[in-house]
Amino acid sequence: MDQITPSSKTDKYEYHDYYNMDALLEEDHLLARDAVRAWVKKEVSPIIEQYSEKGQCPTHLFKGLADIGAFGPSLPAEYGGGGMDEISYGIIMQELERGDSGIRSMASVQGSLVMYPIYRFGSEEQKRKYLPKLGSGEYIGCFGLTEPDHGSNPSGMMTHFKDDGDHIILNGAKMWITNSPLADIAVVWAKNPEGKIQGVIVEKGMAGFTAPEIHGKWSLRASITGELVFEDVRIPKSNILPGVMGLKGPLSCLSKARYGIAWGAIGAAQDCYDSALRYSKEREQFGKPIAGFQLTQKKLAEMITEITKAQLLAWRLGTLANKGEASSAQISMAKRNNVHMALEIAREARQIHGGMGITSEYPCMRHMMNLETVLTYEGTHDIHLLITGMDVTGINAFK
């Protein structure tokens, strides 16, 4: 696939910190943020509109993402991670999603859904074999949980394997898998002969394993998405993750990714707000900038209020995560709130831009389309509401 020529358009983005959140951050957090922000301005902003419009993934950015430490930022450096804390991880995801949700997805899948389960549940041999290459970007990974008929109910999965001496035979299919057509390895969750869920590392080139690309997306168009299909794939038993059995394995990975999304969505919201604020000061109607009209100010004031609330929610979640005290339900609340917030801001920002808001000259429409997917993946908006409901009532409403 040919690399797209960068646009000459200047990225004028400025970060908005209404409550002086920077005072709550450490120097390492700020250094990580500034480095990733500079990379996004240089490498992502000049090309992202063109790649999104063409529905192509800028695969050359995988190496750059590795170079800036975006793959597994909070995993130990000895295993290919960044050795940073959870707030640094969140801030990196925020800056990447300010560029594009698809770029953040490329990174968060690699780090949270591939490297993390291998680090947490893998054998020492598996860690040494895969993690350094994933951290450096030499290997690309994907995560196989969602199936064509089982999304919000992963326990109903049909993908399974049977025993075959020193190997297993894997059959089934997974759907809506970020990075899958490019992936060198897939962390796949399947039922063992006893019906219990286990993680298996499937390698590219294994006979019977294919990963066709999904086309026709109106959202996350700069991210590559596909299926995983397993037809009698013979895999060494040494590729089974030994450290976990049951749904707690994949769900813990999803919590790690959802945490990053809670931060990432703020970046998309910030980009839309920043563009709307600048446009409203430049665009004149009835003899003055539209920023001078009450309805525009109402929109902008509500935007920065919601962004500030989301920033505080993410920061507090990060302090809990650093102490190992962030519950999956708390992560669900932040993911749900912050993504919904970002989507609403993208819609309001598009209105402020008027007709120009639907063009690629401004980022709002692209963010809006992307966030429609982010609202659904890693647990849908409604499912996260039920997770909070179950947590506060103690009653399971899923069944």
Image: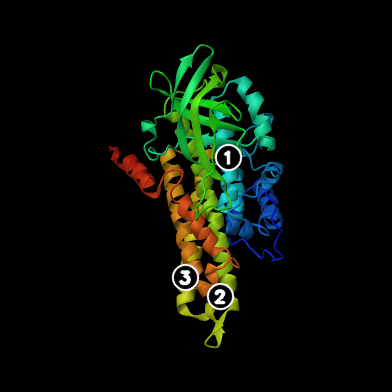
Residue 69 rendering spot, x and y as whole percentages = 67, 42
Name the one closer to the observer, 313 or 264.
264
Q: Quadrant of residue 147?
A: top left
Crowd tier of the residue under label 2, counting other residues whose Cα lies within 10 Å: few below 14, some 14–19, many 20 or above: many
Residue 361 rendering spot, x and y as whole percentages = 61, 68
Give the number of the disc on residue 181.
1
Looking at the image, residue 68 lies above or below residue 98: above
Q: Earlier in the sequence, mark 1 or mark 2?
A: 1
Name the one closer to the observer, 326 or 335.
335
Q: CA distance from mark 3 to mark 2?
A: 11 Å
The amino acid at mark 1 is: Pro
Looking at the image, residue 219 lies above or below residue 320: below
The amino acid at mark 3 is: Lys
Q: Secondary structure at mark 1?
A: helix
Looking at the image, residue 375 lies above or below residue 197: below
Residue found farthest to the bottom: 287
Residue corresponding to mark 2? 280
Q: CA distance from mark 1 to mark 2?
A: 41 Å
Residue corresponding to mark 3? 299
Residue 391 rendering spot, x and y as whole percentages = 34, 40
The amino acid at mark 2 is: Ser
Crowd tier of the residue under label 3, counting other residues whose Cα lies within 10 Å: few below 14, some 14–19, many 20 or above: many
Residue at coordinates 68% horizontally, 47% vertically from top-left? 61
